Amino acid sequence: MKKAIKLTLAVALMLSASSLFAQKFGRINSQEILLAMPETKEMETNMQAYGKDLQDNLETITVEFNQKYLDFQKNFDTYSDAVKQLKQKELQELQNRREEFEQVAQQDYQKKQQELLTPIIEKAKAAIDKVTKENGYLVVFETGSLASYDEAALTDLAPQVRQELGIADAPAAQ
């Protein structure tokens, strides 16, 4: 009876050890995949236009401030004390408005970028998950991360993920 238990235990250990070695591990550079996606290029174009619009508005406020400041300096000696105070207050309000707009614009830009980037990331992640599941990978490591592993021992999933996403060719090396 003890021999049968030992034999069963030994067989079970061998089977579990062999199944461990049969597990598949992969690697992916998701940043490279994201950069190769046409949606990312479209997002960058949209963000450039959005950023230019914000920059144009900021420049309009700056030009207005500079014109009023130059006028104030030019006519400083001719202004009464009450007008000087009024003009200084107006300049300060314009300066505050510019600073406030700059902060809000920065937040809006980041929010817009996140809004446009989220669906792209989700699409790439779904493709990676699909390839991982279809091909039976136990773990997929992100290349370029701080984790240490032998990249040569891992299967690169990038070609399959590119195919899943309909990306024809790899991006040029940077």
Image (tube, rainbow, N blue to C red):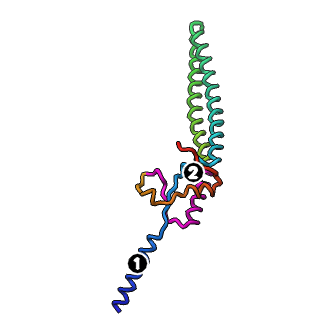
Q: What element carries label 2?
A: helix
Q: Report whether 2 appears left or right of 95.
A: left
Picture coordinates of residue 16 (x, y %)?
43, 76
> Which numbered disc covers residue 33?
2
* Mark 1: amino acid: Met
Write down the region rendered in magenta.
119-145
Q: Does the magenta stretch include residue 123?
A: yes
Q: Is mark 1 on a helix, strand or loop?
A: helix
Picture coordinates of residue 5 (x, y %)?
37, 87
Q: Is residue 124 magenta?
A: yes
Classed neighbour count for the residue bearing mark 1: other residues with Cα under 10 Å, few (<14), some (14–19), many (≥20): few
Camera sees residue 120: yes
Which quadrant does the N terminus fall into?
bottom left
* Mark 2: amino acid: Ile
Picture coordinates of residue 52 (x, y %)?
64, 32
Classify 4 as above or below 150.
below
